[in-house]
Image (cartoon, grey):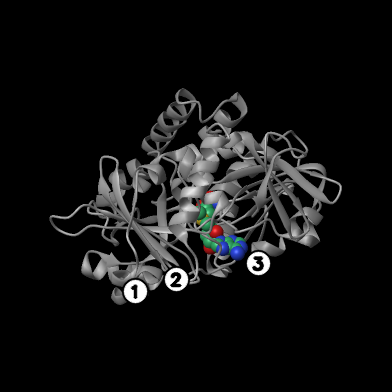
C-alpha cells in the first residue's frame, strides 16, 4: 500500500495529464511515445519534499512538504508545473530540518533537482531512442528521468549513475516502489559505467567541462552522447555527438540546457573572483571608451552562447545606488574588465595578467565577421582529450579548442 505522499490519486493523475498536454502543445514532447511515457510515470513520488526559492531570489528557500496533508495539493501543483523541483541544497540533507524549524533556509547552491519537464522532454526527444537501445544517464538525482527512460525502453536497458550515494539509494528505492529496476550506481559520472556498457546512448543531466574519454569508450559505433557542457558563462551549451571510430562528432543544439556543474569539478565563483580585484588596481587602470554594450551582448542568447563557448570568462553585474550598472568580466587567473555607461557611450577598464576587454571586443567582432551564426551551426569533434570547435562542417572553419 503506497503511503499518502506517493499515492497516485485522481488529483495527481489529472495534474500529470494536464502537464503532459501542455508539453505536447508547446512542442517539448513531439512523439506519441513520449506523451504516453510522461502520462504514465508519476513525478511526485520522486520529490516528496521540495524547496521553493523565495520570490526575492536572495538565496533563501522555504520547505514544501508533500507528506503534510495540509500542503499536499499545493505541493502536487508545484510538482506538476513546468518547474524544476529542488530536493537538495548545498549537498547537505540537514538543510531540510533547518528550513522546517526556521521557515526558510539560506543556501548557496542547489545540489539536486528534478529538472524542468520542458527541458527533460526536449532532451529525451533529442536522444531519438529506438526500441532495443541501451542508455546510460549521468546524474540520477531523484530518479524521475531514469523512470521515464525505463518506461520507454524497459528497465533492463537503462543504467544511471550519481556521485552522491544518498541520492542513488533513495532514487533506487522509489524506482523499485513503482516497479522500475534500472541499474543505479553511486559513481563519478566522468568514469561512465564500464561494467554495464556498451550503451547506444549517453545523456547527462549534470554539466561537465569536457567530454570524458571514458564515455566514448562505452558508446557503441554510431551511438550518441547528449551533453550540457559546463562553461563559466553558462550559455546553455548542449551538444549531441555521434560516436564514429575513436571520435565523437556533432552539432550544438538549437535548444538551450543548463544543469548544475559536476561535483567533481570546482571553479571559483564570479563573486569570489570579483572580490579579488583590488581598488588600487581598478583606480590605476586606464579607462578607454567603447561603443559596445557588454551587458546587452551578454544578455542576447546567441552572442552569449558564442562567448561561453569561445572564452573562459565569467561575469558579474554590480549595481550601486544612483549609478549605472557595471558589467564585469573575470577569469580564474585574476584578470578582469568592466564597462559602465549607456546609449552607445561606454567606459571600459581592464587589469590583471590578461586584457579581457580587448578579448571580449575581438570575440564579438569575430562573431559579427562570421555573419552572426546561430548556435546550431557550430559543432564539436572530440578525439581523446582534444575538443575542436567548428562552424558548419567538421573539416571547415575551425574556431578553436575548448
Ligand atoms: C539536475 S540533477 C539530475 C536530475 C535527475 N536526472 C532527475 O531526474 O532527478 C543533477 C545530478 O547530478 C549529480 N552529479 C553531480 N556531479 C556528478 C558526477 N560527477 N557524476 C554523477 N552525478 C553527478 C548531482 O548529484 C545531481 O543529483
Q: Position of residue 126 (x, y in %)?
A: 62, 35
Question: As rendered, which of 4 and 97 lies closer to the eye?
Answer: 97
Q: Nearer the viewer, residue 296 or 28?
A: 296
CA gap between label 1 and label 2 equals 8 Å
Q: Could you tell me residue 343's position as x and y percent?
A: 26, 40
Q: Which residue is mark 2?
A: 352
Q: Tell me whether circle 2 and circle 3 mark residues in contact (CB < 8 Å).
A: no
Furthest residue toward right: 245
Q: Report crowding for label 3: few under 14, some 14 to 19, many 20 or more residues within 10 A (C-alpha).
A: some
Q: Of the residues tagged 2 and 3, which is closer to the observer?
A: 2
User: Mark 3 or mark 1: which comes first in sequence?
Assistant: 3
Q: Is residue 86 left or right of residue 371?
A: left
Q: Position of residue 60 (x, y in %)?
A: 27, 62
Q: Residue at x 43, y 35 (%)?
A: 16
In the rendered view, would you say 281 is above or below 369? below
Seen at 78% across and 38% down, the residue is: 132
Amino acid at each position: 500500500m503506497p503511503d499518502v505522499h506517493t499515492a497516485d490519486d485522481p488529483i495527481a493523475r489529472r495534474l500529470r495529464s494536464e502537464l503532459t498536454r501542455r508539453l505536447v502543445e508547446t512542442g517539448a514532447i513531439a512523439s506519441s511515445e513520449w506523451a504516453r511515457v510522461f502520462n504514465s510515470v508519476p513525478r511526485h513520488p520522486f520529490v516528496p519534499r521540495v524547496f521553493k526559492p523565495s520570490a526575492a531570489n536572495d538565496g533563501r528557500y522555504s520547505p514544501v512538504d508533500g507528506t503534510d496533508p495540509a500542503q499536499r495539493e499545493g505541493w502536487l501543483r508545484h510538482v506538476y508545473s513546468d518547474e524544476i523541483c529542488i530536493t537538495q541544497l548545498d549537498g547537505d540533507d540537514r538543510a531540510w530540518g533547518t528550513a522546517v524549524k526556521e521557515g526558510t533556509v539560506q543556501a548557496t547552491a542547489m545540489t539536486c533537482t528534478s529538472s524542468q519537464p520542458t527541458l527533460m522532454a526536449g532532451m529525451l526527444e533529442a536522444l531519438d531512442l529506438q526500441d532495443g537501445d541501451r542508455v546510460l544517464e549521468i546524474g540520477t538525482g531523484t530518479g524521475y528521468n531514469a523512470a521515464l527512460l525505463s518506461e520507454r525502453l524497459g528497465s533492463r536497458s537503462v543504467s544511471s549513475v550519481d556521485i552522491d550515494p544518498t541520492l542513488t539509494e533513495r532514487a533506487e528505492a522509489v524506482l523499485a516502489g513503482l516497479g522500475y529496476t534500472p541499474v543505479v550506481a553511486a559513481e563519478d559520472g566522468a568514469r561512465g559505467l564500464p561494467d554495464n556498457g556498451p550503451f547506444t546512448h549517453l545523456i547527462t543531466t549534470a554539466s561537465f567541462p569536457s567530454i570524458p574519454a571514458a564515455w566514448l569508450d562505452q558508446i557503441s559505433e554510431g551511438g550518441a552522447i547528449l551533453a550540457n557542457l559546463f562553461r563559466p558563462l553558462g550559455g546553455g551549451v548542449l551538444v549531441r555527438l555521434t560516436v564514429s571510430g575513436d571520435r565523437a562528432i556533432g552539432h550544438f543544439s538549437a535548444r538551450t540546457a543548463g544543469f548544475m556543474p559536476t561535483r567533481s569539478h570546482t571553479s571559483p565563483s564570479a563573486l569570489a573572483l570579483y572580490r579579488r580585484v583590488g581598488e588600487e588596481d581598478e583606480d590605476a587602470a586606464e579607462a578607454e571608451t567603447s561603443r559596445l554594450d557588454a551587458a546587452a551582448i551578454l544578455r542576447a542568447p546567441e552572442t552569449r552562447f558564442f562567448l561561453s563557448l569561445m572564452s573562459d570568462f565569467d561575469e558579474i553585474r554590480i549595481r550601486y545606488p544612483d549609478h549605472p550598472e557595471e558589467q564585469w568580466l573575470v577569469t580564474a587567473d585574476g584578470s578582469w574588465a568592466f564597462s559602465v555607461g549607456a546609449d552607445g557611450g561606454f567606459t571600459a577598464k581592464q587589469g590583471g595578467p590578461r586584457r579581457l576587454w580587448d578579448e571580449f571586443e575581438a570575440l564579438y567582432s569575430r562573431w559579427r565577421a562570421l555573419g552572426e551564426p546561430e548556435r546550431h551551426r557550430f559543432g564539436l569533434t572530440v578525439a581523446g582529450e582534444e575538443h575542436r570547435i567548428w562552424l558548419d562542417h567538421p573539416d571547415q572553419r575551425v574556431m578553436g579548442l575548448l
